[in-house]
Image: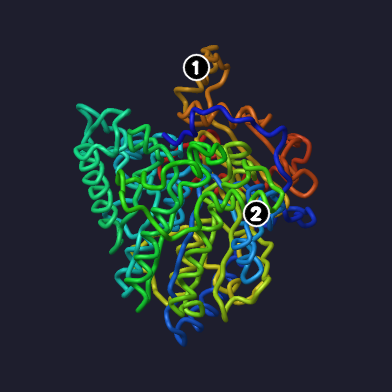
Amino acid sequence: MDEISQTPVKQPAERPDFPAPFPKAGKPRFPLMHKLLLITLVVFVSSSFASEAKKPNIILIMTDDQSWDSLRFAGGKVLTPRIDQMAKDGLFLTDFNVTSTVCSPSRYSFLTGRYAGRCRGEKFLEEHPPGDQTQVENIGELEPDLWNLPKVLQKNGYKTGFVGKSHVVRHDWLAGHGPGGKSPMETYPKNADPQNPDINAKMQRNHRRWCDEIRKYGFDFADGVYGANLKELQCEALNVHNLDWTVDKALKFLDQSKGGPFFLYFSTTLHHGPAPWVHKFSLEADPRLTGEGFVEEGFDVLPARKDVLQRNREAGLPDKAAFALWLDDGVGAILDKVAALGLEEETLILFVSDHGSYRHGKATLYDYGMRVPMLMQWKGTIQPRSRYDELVANIDVAPTLLDLCGIEPPTDYAMDGLSFAPVVFGSKKPFRESVFGELGHSRCIKTKEWKYIAVRYPVKVQKQIDAGKKFRGFEGRELDLPYLTRNGHLGHYAAEKNPHYFEANQLFDLKTDPQENENLYGEIPEITGPLQKELSLQLKQFENRPFGEFAP
């Protein structure tokens, strides 16, 4: 499960402000002809470009649980000079949204261009056979027999690489680790010493199994892989972040692939738990402790960890903020490598988070979970200091990248997203009017001005609620309604930080109330009605998947 560290951390009193103001509110619009015209424009503009240009290299840098307050350019009280420079040198998508706000389904949508609720992975279908209401969370996974972004790129001459956190394949391995489980991973005690040669050999073989499995989903290169989060390594000593290890693997891929074209998916474990601002899990940890066990020779790809703390202090910041600078150093190392290889004008680099922080909106459909920082840098193509303030979603990334590469998707490749290629070349026009979101027992429609969230439980659960059954909450608490997610840890923090979490119908004015504190449902039917109609239309696309009155 996608949990944070058990180490207690002080929670902020309130959520941070977003860095960009929202535009003037108004009635939502959903004209079909307008959408069709925009799609036509996207295809024409991007295809015309791709037919005349060399296929770009692509690096997709994905962080974990990244909150706006951990980026200086977005107002955070941290030091992130390299990422800030990306914002200056490239394109800042100020209203980029993920359609599900926990790790697996969000990453699934990035890599496929499909909503996570469409997943046909073995674990997902085991939990949700056709006819059941889906509870979208960390059971989504890439399907071995369906198209995804790296598979299509690979088929079209790209060398594809995967480095870092997975959480998008083989959930049966993650659930079955241990004696009697289904996982092929070799076992050892949780207090095992990675420096023990026999233990370390097991860890290395387990890592190779993960790498070999990842390659089956469209990747030529897979190294520095975490099956999911650090705790899934099943070793207390390895439950520490190691950015040095993953950056080292990324740089090796770039060296091997510099002839291009290439696609690198680089996924960090930062800023997920265990809390990286608690330095025993990050900057004070032994840099030789990795996802493949103990690596005696260590790594020499990033500034010394003591240097990170020193630069952070010289900036007048507390030590607890240094984790942001550490991640920034990792991003900088990748940027520097691209420059050293002379590939800046041939390489599109994306920086984005999989969802918001558990301290704010993770595991909810509120904007602190859905709306995440997204930067795109492509020297000589993207104009410096560009900004796009319209709606974009993670399902749009895969079709956009294929568009920019001049690649026509296979006819049997189903995608829900739209290409926003014209935005890369300077367009400011909206290309989508709403974003659909799905998480646990909730669904939403978001426009630039409004958001409607519906919470509906499956029929069996609703009957239990109606009968007065109490539900088990986090740490033995008793609840009148179950959390939206199976994971009580995530449900607890989400409910604690968001006062409307359990309410069946929620309407928020994103212009006047960007923190979504005031539920206006029942007060503005002329707004609510069209949003509910749009939600129903979206849900009816999911064949044989009921959701209350919206999709009986």
Numbered circle sitting on residue 351 = none
- The quarter holding residue 523 reads top right
Cα–Cα span, label 1 and label 2: 41 Å
Name which residue type carries label 2.
Leu
Q: Is residue 242 left or right of residue 431?
A: left
Q: Nearer the observer, disc 1 or disc 2?
A: 2
Residue 57 position within the rendered picture, expressed as x and y whole percent measured from the top left: 43, 73
Q: Residue 490 or 504: which is nearer the viewer?
A: 490
- Alpha-carbon neighbours of circle 1 within 10 Å: few (<14), some, or many (≥20)? some
**Residue 404 in picture, x, y percent from top left:** 48, 74
Left or right: 315 with respect to 341?
Answer: right
The chosen color scheme is rainbow
Q: Specify whether 123 is left or right of 281.
A: left
At horizontal 64% and vertical 75% (from top left) the residue drawn is 426
Q: Position of residue 123 (x, y in %)?
A: 32, 39
Label 2 sits on residue = 79
Q: What residue sits 54% from the left and 47% below the top?
A: 355
Q: Earlier in the sequence, mark 1 or mark 2?
A: 2
**Count of labels in the image:** 2
Q: Is residue 477 above or below residue 169?
A: above
Determine whether 486 is above or below 148 in the image.
above
- Quarter of the figure with the N terminus: top left
For residue 100, say whether it is visible: yes
Q: Is residue 552 visible?
A: no
Q: Residue at x 47, y 79 (%)?
A: 346
Per the rendering, the mark at residue 472 is 1
Outermost residue to the bottom? 52
